[in-house]
Structure formats: C-alpha cells, structure tokens
Amino acid sequence: MTTDSEQRAQELLKRNGRVEEPNNIRLTAVRPDSPDDTPQLDYVSDENPLEVHDSSRDRVGHNFFNSERLTVGTTAIELTHTKRAGATHAEITVETAVIRTRVTGESPTSSVGKVFEVGDLIRLQNEQEIADFRAIRRDGTSATIDVEYGY
C-alpha cells in the first residue's frame, strides 16, 4: 500500500523525469526517542509524520518575575533598573513602531543601531546585555515595547 505522501512524491519525480522507478526513495528521519535510547532511522509517512518543533518559542529554563511596558521616543531609553534587578534574561516585544537598539551601552540614533520591526522579539541573554540595552524610535512615531524579565 502506498501512502498519499509517497504517491505525491512519485508523481513529482515522474513529471520531472529524474527517476524512472522512485519506489525505493523515501524520506527518513532519525528519531531520538527509541526504547533503547539510541537514535533510530525511521521512514516518514502519513502514518508516521516527521515532528517539527519551533524551539525559538520555548521559554524552557527561564522563570519570569517582572515586566514593564515602555514608550520609545526621540531620546534613547534604557530598561528600568528596579524592574530588571536580578534578571539574567529578558524578552522584549516591539509593539507599535520600528525601533533601533544597541546592547553596548551606547545610545542608538534614528539612523544607527540594529533595526527591529513591529512584532519582533528581542532576547537578551545576560545581565550585561540587559543593563546595556538602549532603544530609540526609528521613524516619526513613538514605539511601545513590552519587556519580561527572568532568570
């Protein structure tokens, strides 16, 4: 019995004319969760799909204990000292307008610094980056950032 995925793959291969007999071609994955704790090579099919996980959304290992919402205007701002005290990790979401940032302790300008768009997530990974973070709006509209602090 051929699965839907295998049939689609065979049709594509036949149309491209690259493989005359595609029956022996299968997508495989190494699965780390085998009973004897050794990775297993396994065929990927409709019944056995390849699991995909976006680890960029994980918050594993971080306990968030404080947060704040800041307005980013024409003067560079830093994160509030009393809110960030004790934090070794921070996640900043850009909410309403484009900003420029620096994590060197120097102030960005509207034309100098790393650009972050609305919806971007900024992760600061240690106390020094958190203390040295600076932001300014890039264009004519002030921005809002949401910050969560953790360890």
Image (cartoon, grey):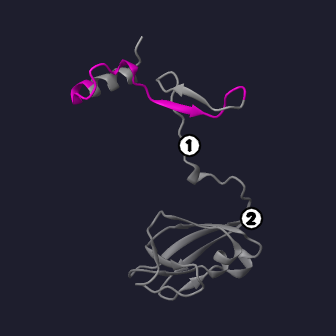
Residue 11 left/right relative to 95 = left
131 or 65: which is nearer to us? 131
Could you tell me the amino acid type at mark 2? Tyr
1 or 2: tag closer to the N-terminus? 1
Q: Position of residue 126 (x, y in %)?
A: 68, 71
The quadrant of the image that shows the C terminus is: bottom right
Q: Residues within 10 Å of mark 2 (few under 14, many from 20)?
A: some
Q: Position of residue 67 (x, y in %)?
A: 67, 68
| Residue marked by disc 2 | 151
Q: Which residues are magenta?
A: 14-36
Q: Position of residue 87 (x, y in %)?
A: 73, 70
User: Image quarter for residue 19?
Assistant: top left
Is 41 located above or below residue 79 in the figure? above
Q: Position of residue 81 (x, y in %)?
A: 71, 81
Residue 93 left/right relative to 21 = right
Could you tell me the amino acid type at mark 1? His
Image point (47%, 63%), residue name: 119
Is 30 located above or below residue 143 in the figure? above
Q: Residues within 10 Å of mark 1 (few under 14, many from 20)?
A: few
Query: For numbered disc 1, what is the local secondary structure?
Result: loop
Image point (74%, 59%), residue name: 63
| Residue marked by disc 1 | 53
Is 89 located above or below residue 44 in the figure? below
66 or 30: which is nearer to us? 30
Spatial CA span between label 1 and label 2: 23 Å
Residue 5 left/right relative to 65 = left
Q: Count of labels shown?
A: 2
